Amino acid sequence: MNTKTALLSAALLVCAGTAQATDYPLTLENCGQTLTFDAAPARTVTVGQATTEILYLLGLGPTVTGTSVWFTNVLPQFAELNAGIPRLADNDPSFESVAAETPDLVTVQHEWHVGPQGIVATREMFHDIGVPTYVLPSDCASKDNSRGSDGTRSEMFSTASIHRSIEELARIYDVEDRGAELVDELKAREAAAIEHARALDLPEGVSAVFWYSSAEMDIDPYVAGRKGAPGYMMQQLGIENVVASDEEWPTVGWESIAKADPTVIVLAEMTRRRFPADDVEKKLEFLRTDPVAKEMTAVRENRIVVMDLQAMEATVRAVYGLEELSAALAGLDLQG
Amino acid sequence: MRSRARRARWHWGWIAPPVLLAALIAGTAIGETRIPASTVLQVLGNKLFGTVYPVARIDEGIIWNYRLARAVVAAACGAGLALSGVVLQALLRNALADPYLLGISAGASTGAVAVTVAGFGAGALSLSTGAFAGALLAFVMVAALARAAGGGTGLQAAGVIVLAGIAGAQLFNAMTAFLIAKSANAEQARGIMFWLLGNLSGARWQDSLVAVPAAALGLGVCLWHVRSLDAFTFGADSAASLGINVRRVQAVLIGAAALVTALIVSLVGAIGFVGLVIPHAMRFLVGGRHRLLVPASALAGAVFLIAADIVSRILIPGQVLPIGVITALIGAPAFAAILIRGRARK
């Protein structure tokens, strides 16, 4: 080994240990569009709770000048920080309310907010006024948002897409060290959660359904398709999803769900109250009183797990969801 | 002529119960999941005749509480919508008249969407309450407009109410579009679509407590007024010349049609095409005399909606289609066939 290679190897080793500063202008591909940044954004508007929480976790809270699309409470450690940041809308903000904040970047959780039929606006509309939009890769990579109500996944959700979001945002904001630290932390938690889940050694044939909400109490509910974050959790635990659809949140009839008789029912908990079934208590009431639903084994044996909605979506909290689910399953008798 | 009509009446009297029963059994036997016919019969035996076959409780629940309740609600709604169509076509002497003409369904949709999207009375007001309120509001507005525009008796009055209905429907459709454009997201659009195109997936026995009396009310009022309905097909003036209290009868019949439609839309959403197609189809089969047309339309509407619901559940495996899609997909070609056959006969 000559001196030159030795020096190069040493340099590479140093680089692996600490991430280097971002070299602006930075160009990166994001969900089919090319974004260029001349400097770290100083003002950010977020469309979607998941992207807001990633920025908070990266220590970028001070750059956030407006947030929107809140389904549940913010992660508890950020309650105070979040309370001080204007909320443009609980649900979908208008294009102008976002533009009025003159953001350097708009970060987006769900592609449909800014997609070709964007509810807020199209990405082009933002780019035309010089505002770049960053969509979380977890909502566009391996996912077709033009099919199905909430998009259809071609591949199983993977936490790698979350890690990628964190690493890319860390590069954009020049906080790569914090990004690498956060990814390592999430990877460690995920590994521990998977180990805990596998150690449960669940019996064969355990199945589950994840119930999000329903447009009306009695009609077909929205439940988790097999390739979203719930699908990932079930895969790690060796649980079968009674729903076969690749749509993110397909509508499936109670007849099909009851006939499949899942071992466990997971209910989404959220602070949003748009539909009566957004309320966990209403979902529980339905399960316990509907003449067919109440006969399902999971209801009779009270094998019902309540999980924060953000943990059921393609977000950093999916790992927390896996932790919660394996902890909950450890306390249930799953025989029969 | 008279004896033929009487024979036909007997014919319908005999044919109605078994046809309806067969449709209800088909609606109960066919669904999203496969349940053996023997199980279906055992559950029906246990529930109706007190037999004690051992059946899985989930199967029993699906067959009795989901499928049969759904078939009964579908039958009642189909009958009610068809009867509303019969009434409106006779009274307005307009072949295109159906419950939607008066803007009732547009109003119901606005009410439902207002509750869903805008969150009016969220929690306290259900979608169906919103739909019912919207339907009645639309009907009252259309009726008031027709009245203010000088609607009285005669052909011209029929034209006025048709125009008022069109104006009302446009207004309410615009409000629905406004509410959707303002704040609906992808998730809500799904709920709204099911509502605008009809959805029987939430039908349970308690819904039949509204649907069956609504259909019975429609049938009763129509049967009570068969002579008046016949007279109105020749125009309000001829009806008046036959000694019919035109205003009172018009109010009773249109009021009943509006109420029945509003109740049905509030239960299962806006299912189109039944009120338009069924009366026409039955007129070709049994003629224009309402003594036959009324019961025939009620029966055909009931069977048609049960059949459409079955198709909506099995057309795409694992996915339930809005029933309004099916009623239009089956209804439009069937309607075309009837039109062409009718022309050939002439």
Image (cartoon, rainbow, N blue to C red):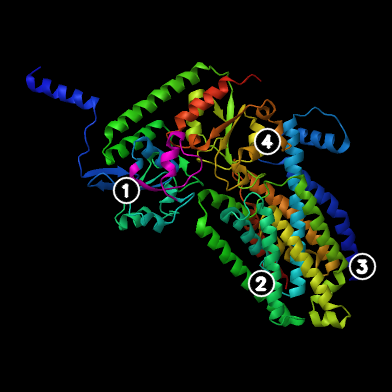
Which quadrant is the C terminus of chain A positioned in?
top right
Q: Is residue A87 visible?
A: yes
In the rendered structure, the answer to whether residue B89 lies left or right of residue A317 reads right
Q: Amino acid at mark 4?
A: Leu
Q: Chain of mark 3?
A: B
Q: Amino acid at mark 1?
A: Arg
Residues indicated by labels 2 and 4 sit on the same polypeptide chain: no
* x and y, in percent, of residue A38 in the image: 22, 47
Q: Which residue is mark 2?
A: B165
Give the crowd class for mark 3: few <14, some 14-19, many >=20 residues within 10 Å.
few
* x and y, in percent, of residue A96 in the image: 39, 58
Q: Which residue is mark 1?
A: A43
Q: Which residue is mark 4?
A: A287
Q: Amino acid at mark 3?
A: Ser
Q: Magenta stretch containing residue A114, yes or no?
A: no
* x and y, in percent, of residue A137 in the image: 37, 40
Is B63 placed above or below B308 here?
Answer: above
Q: Amino acid at mark 2?
A: Gly
